Image (cartoon, rainbow, N blue to C red):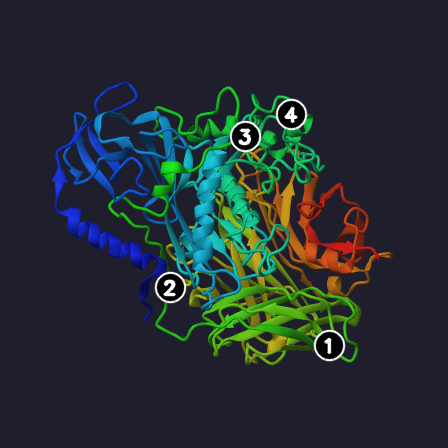
Amino acid sequence: MKTRLLFLTTTCLLPLLLVALVSATRGSQAQPATVQFIDQNNVPISGEVRVLCFASATAVSPFADRIIPVTNGQPEVLPDGCTHLAALRLRHSQPAGKRPGPAYDVYATSWQPGATQPLPASGNVMISDERPLTLFHVVASLGWTPAPGTAVTSVADVTEALRQLSATLYDWTEGQMAIGPISVATGGARWAEADLRFSPANDKRPSAFVGGIVPETLAYTGSFTNTTYTPAATFYGRLWDGRDAFVEGNGRWTQPVAYRTIAHEWAHYALFLYDAYQSHTGLSGYCICADLATTGCRTAVPDASAMAYHYNGAEFWHKDTHLTVANFCYDTWQYRVHGQPDWDTLAQWHLIQGLPLSFAPLRQPTPQLTDGPELGLAAHLFGQEPGWRAFLPAVVRTGTAVPAPSEPTVNLILDSASPPTASQPSQVYLLKGDPANPARILPQGRVTGDPAGAVLGQIRLLDVAPADTVRAFVDWPDAGGRYTLFSNNNPSGNIITQANPWSYALEHNFTLTNNRVAALALFLRDNDGLLAAPMAQICSLDAAVGCHPGWQIPMSDAGGWWQAELTPLPGQAELPRYLVARIWDGSAPAVQKEIVQWLQVAGGVGPTHNDGMAPLLDDVVMVNTQFPLANAGDCNVVSYMPAANNDALTAPLPPGIGGFIGIPLDIRITLFPGQCPIRVPGQPIPLPVSVLINLGYSQDEVDRLGLNEQTQLAILHYVPNFGWALWQQVSGNSDLNWLTAVTTDDGIYAIGWRP
């Protein structure tokens, strides 16, 4: 039986004791109010007002945060000692959709953005719609349970990152948005409810579904094109240092490059903004400043845009400020969708969502932008609900009490007579509990470092318990195939893989219904006829679901391909958009006849296609086209997974290509108006328009190989019955680490390198 435990961090115990002391001395007393609350039209307010009470004008923090009834401007009572105050009036509370409660609250406030001192609690206090503040309610979930003293990511790291996110967001929105209540869960708890979802994988790039904050499916008509926003999330790996997700010490979420990345993804997810670092023809650049990623361009005005290069960009694109803007801005995906600069879109934020407000909660600065304000009084609202004085971050875990997990760093060893001389694509997974029937499967990412003898590299495993097991897969084309883990015990020791001669091909296909993920079909061609009764299952990182029995089904033989179709569980709106699939032989289980790998749904082809699902941005794969299709709807979907086709993985590489950077990816693209095509395994479907495929890569691998990113990287495409074809990229971005190819075909793509 699962239980839910609430833990308070030790840093909260002292404030909690102070709350008790304050309550003992002040809580039972109240003072007559000499203050009158009025609105921006000088009309006395009736209703509820949220009041932060201070003991003086220079008090460091409020001693009370209360919801107080107000009649004709007069509050019923104020807490004793409330000589100064800051006041908020709730104007709209937006449902979250993914969970009970609000996604955000829109307030009118009594202070100017950046103000640090409260007002006297006497006379007229204006709570004005012209000083709006939106407070987001944020839920973050770690898909694993951190070990005590973790070297990777802790609850404290995420909490501090959210605090910095609040300051960054307040700066970028000119003091009109910040973070309010937060909850940080571990062990995969609240995963399906979370706005921020952190995978244990060390190769997961930060990404976000545009408009994923909406409570339900929402159609949007832009200036140039239309799209459909659906409830979704933002995704992250265990770390992020601006280039990779595994560099311990440089990638903790408390560091500027990391929390500014969260702010950039939040702007996609909650503010409906699109990227400004690529043109609609695939060319790389930066709006508004070509040197934004290097020296910056600041003269008299703040650099922009944070949607182009958020590590340096300090503001959103504002047309009256950035008067010398280059034409590149008008070729970006942001302009392609909205037909306007960032701030013009932000001024319509409430209209995009159809909020029942008589005022704009995001007011465009006039005449020009200045450096954004400090949090000031808004800092007191972080992590708080009215009625609590102290910030009480909650750590939510599921399950009965068990020993703390460990985080061992282990070697991955290839049991081969010819040790590798270069790093090879790898995947590592942790199966929680019984390996024959795991409760959850956690993607751990890839091994890193240079090969040394039989050691391919190292990886730190997260959330390891004694009963857990490891699955590891290494693609080694030069050695003729794939190496897999045979022994499956002792996950804290070295991972030893052996050559696996089994030849197979695995493909997938997601289908949509009303812009939600309605089904996943898995297709397996067993070239060697080893499987007698293959079973298929999918697993969510959500602890409440995990590897659900309803997602474990036998595969059926369909014309030489084993096939299984999995659908949402009862009560679910859709399948997880990021999940793990597992296939094994139900009649004679063996690790050498088992497949485990992640799959990612990436929404529709970007940036928009009439009624198609809004895309996932900034991940290792992005698919866009400058030719929108009308009525694509549910026939518009992109997904990808590690390539699992033995023919492709053992095919000779083109002349002059020395190997792969990262893992070859099987990218599935459907984009058709009207009737959706039937996908037949082994038969790619040509697209009716050309698309741009962005592929991200690891800076670490490029650096270890000593490569020049401008001249030595290329995109490869595997063509069935032909082999690997060399695709010249349209553009590359060595700051953000991506290449682009133009194509009309989906299938297996990879980044290759030239010696």
Amino acid bearing label 1: Ala
Query: Compared to 748, does 693 lie above or below?
Result: above
Amino acid bearing label 4: Val
Query: First in sequence: mark 1 or mark 3?
Result: 3
Q: CA distance from mark 2 to mark 4?
A: 49 Å
Residue assigned mark 2: 397
In this rendered view, identify the residue nearer to me: 87 or 96: 87
Q: CA distance from mark 2 to mark 1?
A: 39 Å
Residue assigned mark 3: 342
Question: In this image, 634 relative to 727: left or right?
Answer: left
Amino acid bearing label 3: Asp
Residue neighbourhood size for the residue with mark 3, other residues' Cα within 10 Å, grouped as few (<14), some (14–19), many (≥20): many
Amino acid bearing label 2: Arg
Residue assigned mark 1: 454
Query: First in sequence: mark 2 or mark 1?
Result: 2
Query: Compared to 492, does 563 lie above or below?
Result: above
At which x and y percent is residue 198?
A: 50, 56
In this rendered view, identify the residue nearer to me: 405 or 434: 405
Q: Secondary structure at mark 4?
A: loop
Which of pointers 2 and 4 indicates the residue nearer the eye? 4
At which x and y percent is residue 634?
A: 53, 43
Residue neighbourhood size for the residue with mark 4, other residues' Cα within 10 Å, grouped as few (<14), some (14–19), many (≥20): some
At which x and y percent is residue 363?
A: 44, 26
Question: In this image, 113 relative to 259: left or right?
Answer: left
Which of pointers 4 and 3 indicates the residue nearer the eye? 4
Residue assigned mark 4: 325
Callouts 2 and 3 close, C-beta under 8 Å: no
Q: In the image, what residue occupies the spot 48% across and 79% down?
A: 466
Q: In the image, what residue occupies the spot 30% across and 59% down?
A: 13
Q: Is residue 638 visible?
A: yes
Q: CA distance from mark 4 to mark 3?
A: 13 Å
